[in-house]
Amino acid sequence: MQKKTVLIWISVLVILSGIGWFLGHAYVNQLTPALAQSNLPDGNVLKQDLAKENWTFEPVDPAKVTQTILSRNQAIDMANKQFPNLGDTKSIIGITANLGQLSNPLLRASAQAGEKVDTTFLNPRLVWIVTYEGVISQSAGPRGFPHATSNEFDVVLDATTGEQLMTFVWKR
């Protein structure tokens, strides 16, 4: 009688394990399409997008940098620490970081014309741009006026010190 009970329990456990595996596998497959829809930019996409806003971004291969810089993971960790509430955002699809030289040619032109400008991006500066995809925000403004909705939050960090230089939002 005990052998039958043990065999029944083993059979029940094997069946439940099989069902659990099947449901877990189905859940993971259900998540895959959402991750496949991720639209995280690479350095060249950032270069094109920022050029439309009068910024110059030249992607840099971290392996070819001779000075000491933060790693990609360190840059993401620093951005996460500076914006801890982003970790609570359930809509985040992905996070990435791109290394490059960032500058604003309009600042250079204004400075050459004798205007007082913020010198942060006057000359190309080595930065990490940490991108959080899935952070939804609406532009501010008076009622009745159109508001833009963005789905990306970007943090620009100095690549050597980790200092936050600016943030911006984007719609992809």
Image (spheres, helix red, strand yellow):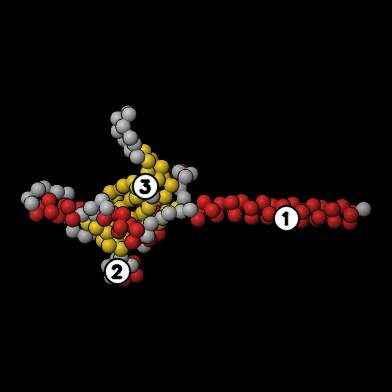
Most distant residue in the right direction: 1
Pair 2/1: label in front: 1
Label drawn at residue 171: 3
Measuring from the top left, give residue 118's x and y in whole percent: 17, 49
Q: Between marks 2 and 3, how big is the CA–CA gap? A: 30 Å
Residue 160 visible here? no
Q: Of the residues under marks 3 and 1, which one precedes in the sequence? A: 1
Q: Classify 44 as above or below 33.
A: below
The amino acid sitting under disc 1 is Gly
Residue drawn 80% across and 55% down? 10
Label drawn at residue 107: none
Q: Between marks 2 and 1, how big is the CA–CA gap? A: 50 Å
Q: Between marks 3 and 1, how big is the CA–CA gap? A: 43 Å
Label drawn at residue 18: 1
Residue drawn 9% across and 54% down? 112
| Label 3 element class | loop
Measuring from the top left, give residue 145's x and y in whole percent: 31, 32
Q: Of the residues under marks 2 and 3, which one precedes in the sequence? A: 2
The amino acid sitting under disc 3 is Lys
| Label 2 element class | loop
Residue 172 visible here? yes
Between residue 66 and residue 102, name the one nearer to us: 102
Pair 3/1: label in front: 3
Picture quadrant of residue 158: bottom left
Between residue 121 and residue 88, name the one nearer to us: 121
| Label 1 element class | helix
Per the image, the residue denoted by label 2 is: 65
Label 2 neighbour load within 10 Å: few <14, some 14-19, many 20+: few
Q: Of the residues under marks 2 and 1, which one precedes in the sequence? A: 1
Label 3 neighbour load within 10 Å: few <14, some 14-19, many 20+: some
